Each structure stands twice: as C-alpha cells, then as structure tokens.
Amino acid sequence: MTRPRLSFAWLHACCGCEISLLDSGGALLDLLARTKLVHFPLLIDHKYGNAAAGSSLGLPEAEIGVVSGGVASQEHLELLAAMRASCQTLVALGTCATHGGIPAMRNQWTSRDTLQTVYASGTDEAALIPSAIGESLDRVYSVDEKVRVDVLVPGCPPAAAAIVEVLLALVEKRSPPLPGKSVCEACPTRRSGKGQGKALRFLRNADGDPNKPLEEMVCLLEQGLLCQGPVTAGGCGGKGAPLCLRARVPCRGCYGPVRQGGNPLLDMLNALASNGIDHRSLVDRKSLLRFSGAHGLLKPLRKRT
C-alpha cells in the first residue's frame, strides 16, 4: 500500500507548532512510519526556489499539506499558493495560521508604521529598513483568508497529541478530532454566575490553594480576573483541565474563538455583562484579540484630524 505523502511549510510564525509536533515523541515516529515526508525544511534538506525573486518553488505533490504561520509578505503568499496547488488536503496548523496569532497584533497599525517602528530611527528612515524582509502585505492574514483550507487546527501551539491525531485521521481517511467546546466547558472551577463588578488586571494571584483540586477554586472570571475561557476554543489540556487553569492563571485566548467566525472581543463583552462585570473597567479591549487579529478584526485606528 502506498504511503500518503506529507508536505510542511512555515510562514510568519515562531516554529512553536513544529516543536510541539517533535514533542509528541514516539507518536511522531509512528506517524512517519505510515507516511512519506516529501517536504519539511525544518527537518529535511529539501530546498525550494526564492519566491521573492519570482523563481519556481518546485514543491512536490502531496496528499496532505501542513502550513503554520500567518501570511504577512508577498513571499508568504506565493509559498502558500504553491502549497495549495501541490497538496490535496491542506491543514492550517496553529493559531497564527487559523486566526493570525500574535503576529496579527500589528494589524492595529499600517504596514509602514510597523516597519518604521521596528527598524527605523534617525533621519534616513528608508535606508534603515532592510530589503531582506521582502514586500510586506498591508496586514497579517490567516491562511484561510488567502486560500481554501480543509482543516483548521488552532493552538499556540496545538497540543502535541492533537497534531498527531489530526494527521493520523487524515491518513486513515476519517474526520479529524477538532475542538468543539469552549475552555469553560472543560474547566472544573466553581461558578455561581456572580462576578466582582469590574475586571481586574492580572497583577495578583488568584484566590485558591494551588495544592488543592481545581474543583475547590472559584471561577477566575468571577474573581474579577479577565479569563477568556467563555469565548475560547478548548483542547489545550487534552481530556483534562485547561492548561492555564491548572497553573491558576486566566485563559488568554490562544486557541482562538470557539465560535466559527466569532469575534472574541464582542463575545467577551457579552460574557462580562452576563457575569455582572462592567465592561468599562477593561484597561485594553484590543488585548482580547491578541491571538485573533486576522479576518479584519484588528484594524488601524483612524487618525484624528
């Protein structure tokens, strides 16, 4: 029986998704034994041409393609298009690919303002912006904004076991297991539906003995700590409690919105209202989109004239 071919590409990301895959250990070896790895620049010496120079990328055909990272430059866009053309099934891996992730926080500013802030200083600003970064797009896009995507696997990074489970499901031609519930639905803390009246910045520890079970701790949102569990897709803790809650810290939304096409900022304001928390007490509303700034959710503010 012919083994299905796997192809991986890395766009605007930190490599955390790939490290998570490597952390799966023996499960990764089992996956590789059942597939043929044809392109994975971080693991195997398979080169492709320079997209910025207009040369052919020459990506091999594959039954399953995996792309991590968002789309921030013309080179990313060309590589993504080549992956879509060469792969039968395309997987967007990680929250940067599915919702923009941390890099999409720059969507609050124009591309020019971002480059000048990061690189330029002094009088000759243009000369200080390196040409090696390539031609930037107007903002950071998620993968599904630019090409058709078959499977979205959120997480910053996704759990190691979850990545392998999704890929094995595709190899076996069955529906991949994906998050369908919110972080709150997997959180065992005690809830009464009564908040503290205002949202507090996370500058103090949560009330609760870390040596006792989570079931004995009051919901962090009801304690006044800004926990995005109500609007964030679950899955970070596997079949157990969410990882942040195990550490007694609020969910920060790294798995993206639980609702397909949802807006975590607006949905979280509704969640605050339903818990009796004044939304006006939020210090930085845009921080609710720290992992979900693609799909046009984060935009530059109009300059006042």
Image (cartoon, rainbow, N blue to C red):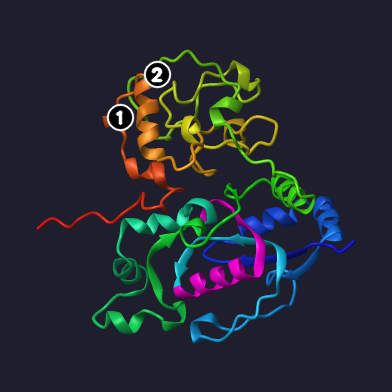
- Image coords of residue 156 (percent x, y): 57, 49
- Residue 85 lies within the magenta run: yes
In the foreground, 209 or 240: 240
Q: Say which amino acid is labelled 1.
A: His
The residue lying at 60 percent from left, 16 percent from top is 216
In the foreground, 107 or 63: 63
The residue lying at 53 percent from left, 33 percent from top is 249
What is the residue that sits farthest to the left in this orientation? 305
The magenta span reads 74-96
Question: In the rendered view, would you say 219 is above or below 305?
Answer: above
- Residue 256 lies within the magenta run: no
Give the total number of marks visible in the rendering: 2
First reached walking from the N terminus: tag 2 or tag 1:
2
Q: Secondary structure at mark 2?
A: loop
- Image coords of residue 108 (percent x, y): 32, 55
Q: Is residue 94 left or right of residue 119?
A: right
Q: Say which amino acid is labelled 2.
A: Gly
On the image, numbered disc 1 is attached to which residue? 279
Q: Are marks 2 and 1 in contact (CB under 8 Å)?
A: no
Query: Is the stretch drawn in magenta largely helix, strand or loop?
Result: helix
The disc label shown at residue 58, or none: none
On the image, numbered disc 2 is attached to which residue? 195
The residue lying at 55 percent from left, 16 percent from top is 190
Figure quadrant of residue 271: top left
What is the residue that sits farthest to the right in this orientation? 1
Q: Is residue 96 left or right of residue 200?
A: right
Figure quadrant of residue 262: top left
